[in-house]
Amino acid sequence: MAKQKTYDEHSIKILEGLEAVRKRPGMYIGSTDKRGMHHLVWEIVDNSIDEIINGYGNYIKILLHKDGSITVADNGRGVPIGMHESGKSTPEVIYTILHAGGKFETDGYKVSGGLHGVGGSVVNALSSRMEVTIYREGKISQIKFRDGGHVESPLKTIGESKKTGTIVTFLPDKEIFKNCNFSFTTICERMQESAFLLSNVTIEVIDEEDNLSAKYHYENGIVSFVEYMNENKTAISKVVHFQNTKNKIEVEIALQYTDSYNEQILSFVNNVKTGDGGTHEVGFKTGITKAFNDYAKSNGILKGKDASLDGSDVREGLSAIISVKIPEELLQFEGQTKGKLGTSEARSVVESITYENMKFFLEENKETAVGILEKAQKSKLAREAARKARESVRKGGGKNNKERILSEKLAKATGKDYAKNELFLVEGDSAGGSAKSHRNRETQAILPLRGKVLNCEKASAKDIEANAELRQLEYAIGAGLGPDFDYRESNYGKVIIMTDADVDGSHIQILLITFFYRFMRPLIEQGMLYVATPPLYAIETSKGKEYIATDEELEERKKTLKGSYKVQRFKGLGEMNADELYETTMNPANRRLYRINLTDAAIAEKRIHVLMGDEVAPRKEWINENVDFTLEDDFRK
Ligand code: 28G
């Protein structure tokens, strides 16, 4: 008979497991910054979502407490409370034993989302305090942990109740997550998305510190999601909604056309966002392009064999949600963050379901079909005209005009290794002047921007051409616009937005990021767009001057400073002298750049709606609720 491990040996093994998580948190939650800390919340909430998807419960509540801890509660069946064969209670096992299948495991393809109980122990390991309260079998039971998963008080009954459900409270370990706090807005954005995907579930988020609350409940799921995406746009079709299952892959899609010039497609696999798309998105795009081209040809709208519409023409003005459910054995994810679906079966399944349903929709809604096709044809003409114009510029014609426009403001880099060159977009002529005078002339180019740039939320390529500031930007980068943009032709390997660290500055960041998101998206996809983070403070001591990036770092530094010192707060770039600006914010040896990713950009775009929308009400609300929350806040880690 195999020797049984003693209770103590067993406990030591468990603590070693939790310790491994604390040693390399990045392996389990990606990072230990703000994003990583929010990952803890997603892990716990995912357990509630799994319970609800299994058919138990319809309500999730999240409370952000004043002390930095957070509570997640659901009304599912409650975690089982029986004893495990090891002599420990089931909740103790669930929250202390590492389960296989961490999302960031390095074995390649692992399921993201939808694994029961995974993550609870990881969250416990990274928390200085965790409490699990369970309503089940007529009782209220509770277990408490401290310092990364050590049992402080084993599971015991603390009361009676007829309710069922699970409540988890945890305080992320400050040693691991330095200077981080939970963001009400970030949690709300994610929970709203979950509520759209799980129709008829109520998700409530409450911030006890700032007295904010939000409640999400959508009866019509992803149809409501598309309506929400198009809230401030003018629709030119009704919402098209279809679902079907083939080869064990379940597909649900909602889409609607608007009169805007942009496409917005969000995709999900097993309720988890696939930020980098993948086979399901590819299948959707192929299917919808084919449906429109077939319809247009068989109805005499497109004639001749080479006159077909490109995918990007057919998607102009399209908003869509693609939600697929794939069984575990077929799931494959790709890419660094595993945000891209790799399952190849999903491509053909989504393509054929999309094609069949869109063909049917177009046949049944001829007027809408013709409207969308007219728009797609205009897009095609505009695309061809833009390409011809660019070609003629490249061949020399029109070059003088372009040169003249550029010479006015752009201070170029002299180096010819374009990938090494950097374009700084600088808020204000005075900071622009400083940046020009002290830059590294070989690799750094400066384009000063005067005040707020155009809001591109609803702009077309034509609007960009009509706007002097954005036209300069387009020409400076020199790689085209919209569907014709080709990042390989960019004159710069990095484009760096440099604004004041104030509300106007972050507003300009949001406007610029939205411009890039809408008209030069591959630049973001390729990781070529950055935000500079100028220091907020300078401290002058007898030993000299030093620069401090954030409020938190200032407080830390003050603790260690002896003798007298002077603190200067930089309200804008213009308050630094040119040398300071270069050394702190532009010099690659010292600066900190924040790289914009697609998620940041999508958030910026959504925020612009609220910030700039025609409706006064949401704007006021936004300012009231988010005065402390700008994108900039996310950039300063
Ligand atoms: C509040 C914050 C996070 C949860 C449940 C419910 C059950 C459960 C959770 O079972 C063991 C292992 C895999 C199924 C299951 C209750 C069956 C019967 C549950 C949560 C059993 C864990 N009764 N609710 N875990 N699994 N909510 N919310 O964590 O096979 S976790």
Image (cartoon, rainbow, N blue to C red):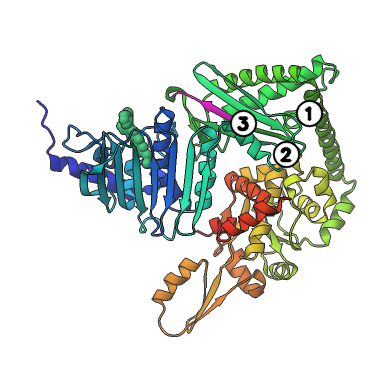
In this rendering, the answer to whether 167 lies above or below 572 is: above
Q: Position of residue 343 (x, y in %)?
A: 51, 25
For ligand 1, the image quadrant comes to top left
Which mark, residue 262? 2
Q: Amino acid at mark 3?
A: Val
Q: Secondary structure at mark 3?
A: helix
Contact between labelled residues 3 and 2, with CB atoms less than 8 Å apart:
no
Q: Position of residue 578 (x, y in %)?
A: 66, 73
Q: Secondary structure at mark 1?
A: helix
Q: Nearer the viewer, residue 267 or 479?
A: 267
Distance from disc 3 to disc 1, alpha carbons, whole Å, reads 20 Å
For the point 26% across and 48% down, which residue is it? 144
Q: Secondary structure at mark 2?
A: loop
Q: Earlier in the sequence, mark 2 or mark 1?
A: 2
Bounds of the magenta segment:
322-327
386 with respect to 507 (left or right): right
129 with respect to 505 (left or right): left
Give the image quarter of residue 88: top left
Cβ of mark 2 under 8 Å from ligand 1: the answer is no
